[in-house]
Amino acid sequence: MADTPFVVDDGVDPREIKQPSTTTQYNAAVTSTTKSGADAALNLLKETGGVRRSVDPETSRRLVRKIDLHIMPLICIVYFLQYIDKTAISYASVTGILESTHLHGNQFNWVASIFFFGQLAFEFPTIRLIQLFPLAKYVAVNVTIWGAVLASLAACKSYGSLLACRFLLGAAEATVVPAWVVFTSQWYTKKEQAFRVGIWFSVCGAAQMFGGYFAYGVASHVGADPHAALRGWQIIFLFLGLLTACIGISFWFIMPDSPEFAGFLTQEEKSLHIERIRGNEQGIGSRTFKWDQFQEALTDPMTWLYAFWVFAANIPNSIATSFGNILVKGMGYTGKQSLLLVTPLGAYEIVALVGLTYIAMKAEQRLYACIAGHIPAIIGAILMATTNKTPALIGYYLSGGIPIGWTTILGLQASNVAGSTKKITVSIIGTMAYTVGNIISPQTFQAEDAPRYLPAKISIVILYFLITVDLCIMRWVFVRRNRLREEEKNAKGEEYQVEENHEFFDLTDGKNREFRYAL
């Protein structure tokens, strides 16, 4: 994609280009089609003259292992840092930042919320920029910038400077979720995507654990020394920020922008990979911005069902991020104890995410697995609202099952949303819903409700129930759409024709009648 200029759709439908019989004619057709906005996968098909090729299971397994080895580690590392970097403010809250910057009242709430204002402000520009520039290079620049901004938080001395840095941090992190959805859809089949999303999202749990232990160590050693040149919270921001900047620079050199430019794959393996993902009914991406796909994203009810889940589920998100330690303190523990006691939440999250997404992959029932993961979380929310100490803490840990819904939504956006512009737009709208939910989230924990924050806990119970109902509606819509398309196909009988290489014409799931939705 790096060699293809960014254009706005010129109105030429790639399906109108006839399929020629010779390789030379085919290559000419591919070039014409690519200019009119088809998928970049057609470039790779030049090597085989556009002829379909079978990929035996053992070859496919070897290729997936190779992709996993080269793609997943860096994807996981950056997502790990993305989570821990934005939640570092929670660790700072119990390691001296409130006193050092003279925060009072609900000012800390706004320091937590302003991150998401920055993320929200930069989401719509991201729709264009993520297609305009080579994907991995654009992500690398953003990761490096947010690392530098995070390190700069260590120099903040006032409420205003904290707000400015947190806003910029949110803007720099705006690209991560949309980019990760695109990466997942480029490299994996529909069946593989749910488990891979579960793996890279589960590192949030690992980040929760590492962050708690790291902050505890800082609080025990640096925080215990009144003569230390830097306070504990400053050490946290400096270490995490500089580490992130180094990873961002590495991302530039290691991560390919798409399978088309993957140096670790041979030309033969690239061609086999394209054949492997034909069944996705979508390719590896087009850099043409298409207004009709943008409009379809806005009018598709599924876009808003995704967005509602993400919005509602993230209103309680402060229990794991900005207010996690404060909430555990309110259960009857000390601030230092809270740094350790929040870590089992991360462990439960890892087990729930990896376990349920693996079951979903094997059973090919993502939404049922997701709903099963929500039920313990609803019970946990009730325990947090009605009990104290150990039972409330157990309830807090059970809430770690809710992120299975987030991984399911991200996986469905990768699998069930086709068309490059539509996919990015739907992902951006979901991320905007995420940011709005997280902007509201800290405000549900009002100072006058401390230390139990009962109104916030009651709202969590209600919201967890509503998002579970939302998942049931999603599945009903997918089942109905698949059934109607099968009926349409059967009604036409022999008149039903499938166009050659239609998978790579960058059609949306709405326009591609061969598209079937994963459940």
Image (cartoon, rainbow, N blue to C red):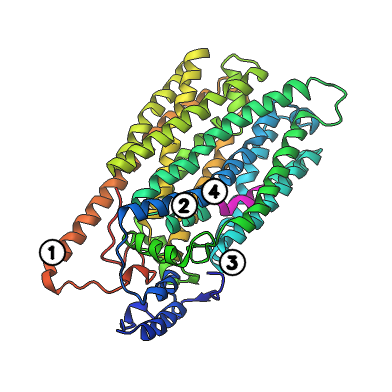
Q: CA distance from mark 1 to mark 3?
A: 42 Å
Left or right: 30 as drawn, with respect to 132:
left
The earlier-in-sequence mark between 4 and 3 is: 4
Callout 1: SS? helix
Badge 2: residue crowd in 10 Å (few <14, some 14–19, many ≥20) = few
Q: Position of residue 382 (x, y in %)?
A: 42, 22
Q: Are marks 4 and 3 in contact (CB under 8 Å)?
A: no
Q: Identity of the amino acid at label 1?
A: Asn
Residue where numbered disc 1 is placed: 490
Q: Which numbered disc, 1 or 2, marks the residue closer to the eye?
A: 2
Q: Are marks 2 and 4 in contact (CB under 8 Å)?
A: no
The earlier-in-sequence mark between 1 and 2 is: 2
The earlier-in-sequence mark between 2 and 4 is: 2
The earlier-in-sequence mark between 4 and 1 is: 4
Please state the extent of the stretch shown in magenta in the rendering.
167-177
Q: Which mark is residue 66?
A: 2
Residue where numbered disc 4 is placed: 75
Badge 4: residue crowd in 10 Å (few <14, some 14–19, many ≥20) = many
Q: Which mark is residue 299?
A: none
The earlier-in-sequence mark between 1 and 3 is: 3
Q: Which numbered disc, 2 or 3, marks the residue closer to the eye?
A: 2
Q: Identity of the amino acid at label 3?
A: Phe
- Prevailing SS of the magenta stretch: helix
Q: Which mark is residue 133?
A: 3
Based on the displayed image, in which of its 4 quarters is residue 366 positioned? top left
Left or right: 191 as drawn, with respect to 218:
left
Callout 4: SS? helix
Q: Position of residue 65 (x, y in %)?
A: 44, 49
